[in-house]
Image (tube, grey):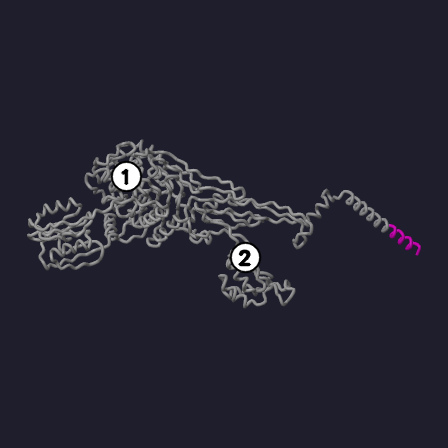
C-alpha cells in the first residue's frame, strides 16, 4: 500500500510540474505578446485590421469612339445578366418568397423576353441540387429595356447582375476600321474589355484607362462598419477618340456596297472616300464584312484590306505615269503614235492594247489616254526614260507604307528589274499597291501637286482634364507642280466626257465634273500567269470631283463580280462611285457647277428654199439639219415654222425628189416620228429609250405608206452592251 501511495504522489508531482511549466510558458507568451503586440514578427493589430479590410475595384470607363461630328460609333453600355435563385432557404417569409416557386409560369413568361424556349427554361429551373442558375448567352448582355420588362413581371427568385459591354450603335459600320472589343478574364483578375481588332486594338491602352479602388472596413457580410474610414482612389477613364470618318458619308458608302454586293456577289469590294486637301479619310469600307457585336461574318475576312492587302492596280496607275510625263514635259496631247502593239525587245511577246492588240491605228496621245492604250503609255515611258519614271514612283510613295495609324499596313512591291517589268509598271501590271497608297498618291493630283498623308484619327480627348491632342494634316511630298496637276485633271476629265473614254457614261455626275481613270487588272494565278475569263479581273475607278477644285477623292475596287454576258465590269464600280460621290458632295453643300443655259430659238420658214441654204441657216442657230429627199427645193419641215426649239435639236427637212431614210441609230422616239410623219410612213415602235434597230436600211428609198419598224432600248442597256462587246474582244489583253 505504501508503495502504491508513494507512486501516486510522484505522478501527481510530475503532473503538477508539467502543468505548472505550461502555465508559466503561456503566461510568459501572453505577457510577451501583450508587451510587443507581435507574433512571429507580424503585428497583431495589423492582422486584425486586415481581417475586416475590404477593397472593391472601381472600374474605369472605356473611352468612346466618335465620328468627326461627335456621333457615337463605339461606347460602353450597361448590360445585365439574368439569374434565378432556386434555394428555398433564402426565403424567410413564405408570403414574400425570394426563390423560384412556380417554374412553369416563369418559363412561359421568360420565354417571351429571352431567346430560349419555354421547355429549355423549365429544364434549367428544375435542375436538382442547384441553388442558382443563369441562362447562358440568352440571359447575358441584356439591355436596360429588357431588364425593366422582366422586372415588371414580378417573378419571385429573379435577379440581375449588372455589367458593362461594348456597344456599336451603327451595327455593320466601318467594321474593319473600328474593329471590336470583348470582355476577357485572365490570371484570376477581374474581367475587362479588351480591344481585339482595328482601332479598338491599336488604341486599346489609351481607350482602357486605369481602374480605381474603394478600401473600407467591413463585417463578414461586407457591410461597412460604423465610423470606418473609406479610402477612394478615383479611376482614370479611358480617352475618347474622334475619327475623321463622317457618319453620313460612311452610311452612303455602306448602303452602296451592300447593293452591289447583293447584286453582283463579288469576291471583294474595297472603297475609300477622302478629303484630298487634308488627307482625312471620310469613309472606308469593304465586303465581306462582319458585325462587331455578334462577329457574324468575321470568318470570311478579319483583315482591314484597305491597308493590309496589296494588288496589281491596272490602268488606274496610268494617272501617275501620265502625271510624270506631263511634269517632265514629254506629253504632247496632239502628237500621234501607232496603237495596237509595242515590242519591248525581240525576245518578249509584244505589249498589246486591250482590243486584242488591234489598236485604233495612229492616234493622238490624248486619245491614247482616253482609250487607255497600254501601247501609248509604253511610248511615253520611252520619252521620259525608265530611270525618271522610277524616281516618280518613289515620289508618289509607291512601295512604301503611308504611315497611317492602323495596324499591319502593307507596303506593296515595285517590280523593276527586267525591261518588261519597267514597261508594264506604267500601266499597273506587276507592281502591287494598297488602296491607301492610291488615295495618298492621287491627293497630289487633286491638291495641286501637294500629296497629303492619309489619317483616320482627328483628335484624342482626355475626359478628365479636357486635354485635346489633334492630328494636323501632313504633306507627304510634292511630286509635281500645281500647273501639271491641273493639266492632268483636265486630261482625266476627258476619260469621262469623250466618246472614246473608257469612263464615258459610267462615271458622269449631274451637276459636277469628274476627273478620273478606270482600271481592269488581271489577277495572278497560283501556278503562274493570270486567271482567264471575262469575270476574273479587278475592276476599279479612281476619281475626284469637282474637277477644277476637287473636294472629294474616291477609290473603288470590285474583284470578280458575277456579270451577265451583256454587262461590263465598270457597272458595279460605278454603282458605288456615282451615288456615294454625288450624295457626299450634296451633303457637304458643294454647289453644283453652273451649266450653260440652252439657247432657245424659233424655227424660220424653210419652204421653197434650197436644201443647202436651209442647212446653213439651221447650223448658224446651233440646230442639226437632216435631209430626206434628193430634190433642190424644200417642201416641208419638222418641227414647223414658228415652233420653238433648243440648241442641238434635229430639224427634218423634206425636199422634192425621191425620199430616203437616214441612219437613225441612237435617235429618240420624238425624232423618229418627225421622219415618219414627213415621209408619210406607217411606223411600228417596239421598246423604250433610243433607237437600236430599224427595218429599212439607211439611205434606202421609201414611198408613202411604207412600214417602218424600229426597236428602242434604254440608254443604260445600250452602253452596257457596247462595253460588254468591247470586253469580249479584249480577252487577250483586258487592261484598260
Q: Secondary structure at mark 1?
A: helix
| SS category of the residue bearing label 2 | strand
Is 701 covered by the magenta stretch?
Answer: no
Quadrant where the C terminus is found in the figure: top left
Image position of 522 with respect to 125: above or below: above
Query: Label 2: how many residues lie within 10 Å, few (<14), some (14-19) or many (20+)?
Result: many
What separation in Å lies between label 1 and label 2 (alpha carbons)?
62 Å
- Location of the N terminus (image quadrant): bottom right
Residue 466: percent from the left, percent from the top?
Answer: 52, 42
Residue identifier under label 2: 81
| Position above or below: 122 against 483 | below
Predominant secondary structure, magenta span = helix
In the rendered structure, the answer to whether residue 399 lies left or right of residue 533 reads: right
Label drawn at residue 403: none
In the picture of the structure, the residue carrying the numbered disc 1 is 490
Q: Is residue 175 visible?
A: yes
Q: Nearer the viewer, residue 77 or 174?
A: 77
**Residue 699 visible within the image:** no
**Where, by quadrant of the figure, is residue 381 drawn?**
top left
Residue 150 on image: x %, y %: 53, 62
Query: From which residue to which does the magenta span run?
Result: 1-13
* Residue 46, quarter of picture: top right
Q: Is residue 6 magenta-colored?
A: yes
Instruction: Give the residue drawn at x 36%, y 33%.
Output: 478
Tell me residue 235's x, y (percent): 57, 45
Q: Earlier in the sequence, mark 1 or mark 2?
A: 2
- Closest to the observer: 330 or 444? 444
Question: Crowding at label 1, few (<14), some or many (≥20) Cα neighbours within 10 Å?
Answer: some
Instruction: Using the image as rendered, state which of residue 13 and residue 292 is in the foreground.
Output: 292
Q: Residue at x 71, y 43 (%)?
A: 42
Amino acid at each position: 500500500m505504501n508503495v502504491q501511495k508513494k507512486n501516486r504522489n510522484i505522478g501527481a508531482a510530475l503532473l503538477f510540474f508539467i502543468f505548472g511549466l505550461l502555465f508559466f510558458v503561456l503566461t510568459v507568451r501572453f505577457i510577451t505578446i501583450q508587451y510587443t503586440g507581435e507574433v512571429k514578427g507580424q503585428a497583431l493589430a495589423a492582422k486584425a485590421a486586415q481581417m475586416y479590410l475590404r477593397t472593391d475595384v472601381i472600374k474605369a470607363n472605356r473611352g468612346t469612339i466618335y465620328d468627326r461630328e461627335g456621333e457615337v460609333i463605339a461606347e460602353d453600355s450597361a448590360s445585365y445578366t439574368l439569374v434565378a435563385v432556386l434555394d428555398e432557404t433564402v426565403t424567410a417569409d413564405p408570403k414574400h418568397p425570394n426563390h423560384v416557386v412556380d417554374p412553369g409560369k416563369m418559363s412561359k413568361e421568360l420565354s417571351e423576353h429571352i431567346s430560349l424556349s419555354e421547355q429549355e427554361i423549365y429544364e434549367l429551373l428544375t435542375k436538382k441540387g442547384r441553388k442558382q442558375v443563369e441562362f447562358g448567352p440568352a440571359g447575358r448582355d441584356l439591355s436596360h429595356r429588357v431588364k425593366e420588362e422582366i422586372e415588371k413581371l414580378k417573378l419571385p427568385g429573379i435577379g440581375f447582375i449588372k455589367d458593362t459591354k461594348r456597344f456599336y450603335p451603327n451595327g455593320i459600320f466601318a467594321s474593319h476600321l473600328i474593329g471590336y472589343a470583348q470582355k476577357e478574364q485572365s490570371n484570376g483578375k477581374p474581367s475587362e474589355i479588351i480591344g481585339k481588332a482595328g482601332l479598338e486594338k491599336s488604341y486599346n491602352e489609351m481607350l482602357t484607362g486605369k481602374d480605381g479602388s474603394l478600401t473600407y472596413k467591413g463585417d463578414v457580410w461586407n457591410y461597412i462598419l460604423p465610423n470606418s474610414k473609406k479610402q477612394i482612389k478615383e479611376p482614370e477613364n479611358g480617352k475618347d477618340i474622334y475619327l475623321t470618318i463622317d457618319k453620313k458619308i460612311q452610311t452612303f458608302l455602306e448602303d452602296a456596297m451592300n447593293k452591289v454586293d447583293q447584286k453582283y456577289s463579288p469576291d471583294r469590294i474595297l472603297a475609300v472616300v477622302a478629303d484630298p486637301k487634308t488627307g482625312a479619310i471620310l469613309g472606308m469600307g469593304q465586303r465581306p464584312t462582319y458585325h462587331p457585336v455578334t462577329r457574324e461574318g468575321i470568318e470570311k475576312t478579319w483583315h482591314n484590306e484597305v491597308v493590309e492587302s496589296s494588288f496589281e492596280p491596272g490602268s488606274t496607275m496610268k494617272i501617275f505615269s501620265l502625271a510624270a510625263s506631263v511634269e517632265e514635259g514629254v506629253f504632247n496631247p496632239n502628237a500621234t503614235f501607232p496603237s495596237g502593239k509595242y515590242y519591248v525587245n525581240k525576245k518578249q511577246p509584244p505589249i498589246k492594247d486591250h482590243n486584242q492588240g488591234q489598236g485604233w491605228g495612229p492616234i493622238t496621245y490624248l486619245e491614247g489616254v482616253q482609250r487607255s492604250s497600254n501601247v501609248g503609255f509604253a511610248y511615253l515611258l520611252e520619252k521620259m526614260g525608265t530611270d525618271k519614271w522610277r524616281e516618280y514612283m518613289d515620289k508618289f510613295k509607291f512601295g512604301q507604307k503611308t504611315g497611317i495609324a492602323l495596324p499591319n499596313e502593307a507596303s506593296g512591291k515595285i517590280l523593276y528589274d527586267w525591261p518588261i517589268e519597267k514597261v508594264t509598271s506604267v500601266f499597273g501590271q506587276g507592281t502591287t499597291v494598297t488602296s491607301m497608297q492610291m488615295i495618298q498618291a492621287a491627293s497630289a493630283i487633286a491638291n495641286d501637286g501637294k500629296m497629303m498623308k492619309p489619317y483616320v484619327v482627328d483628335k484624342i480627348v482626355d475626359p478628365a482634364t479636357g486635354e485635346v491632342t489633334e492630328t494636323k494634316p501632313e504633306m507627304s511630298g510634292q511630286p509635281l507642280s500645281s500647273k501639271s496637276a491641273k493639266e492632268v485633271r483636265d486630261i482625266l476629265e476627258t476619260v469621262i466626257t469623250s466618246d472614246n473614254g473608257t469612263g464615258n457614261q459610267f462615271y458622269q455626275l449631274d451637276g459636277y465634273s469628274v476627273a478620273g481613270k478606270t482600271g481592269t487588272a488581271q489577277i495572278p494565278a497560283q501556278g503562274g500567269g493570270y486567271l482567264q475569263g471575262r469575270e476574273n479581273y479587278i475592276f476599279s475607278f479612281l476619281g475626284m470631283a469637282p474637277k477644277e477644285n476637287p473636294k472629294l477623292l474616291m477609290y473603288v475596287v470590285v474583284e470578280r463580280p458575277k456579270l451577265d454576258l451583256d454587262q461590263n465590269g465598270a457597272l458595279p464600280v460605278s454603282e458605288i462611285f456615282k451615288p456615294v460621290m454625288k450624295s457626299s458632295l450634296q451633303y457637304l453643300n458643294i454647289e453644283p457647277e453652273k451649266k450653260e443655259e440652252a439657247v432657245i430659238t424659233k424655227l424660220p420658214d424653210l419652204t421653197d428654199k434650197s436644201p443647202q441654204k436651209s442647212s446653213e441657216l439651221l447650223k448658224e442657230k446651233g440646230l442639226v439639219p437632216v435631209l430626206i429627199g434628193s430634190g433642190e427645193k424644200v417642201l416641208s419641215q419638222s418641227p414647223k415654222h414658228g415652233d420653238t426649239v433648243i440648241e442641238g435639236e434635229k430639224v427634218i427637212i423634206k425636199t422634192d425628189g425621191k425620199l430616203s431614210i437616214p441612219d437613225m441609230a441612237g435617235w429618240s422616239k420624238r425624232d423618229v416620228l418627225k421622219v415618219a410623219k414627213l415621209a408619210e410612213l406607217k411606223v411600228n415602235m417596239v421598246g423604250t429609250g433610243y433607237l437600236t434597230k430599224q427595218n429599212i436600211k439607211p439611205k434606202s428609198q421609201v414611198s408613202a405608206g411604207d412600214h417602218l419598224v424600229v426597236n428602242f432600248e434604254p440608254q443604260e442597256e445600250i452602253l452596257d452592251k457596247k462595253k460588254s462587246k468591247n470586253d469580249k474582244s479584249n480577252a487577250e489583253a483586258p487592261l484598260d
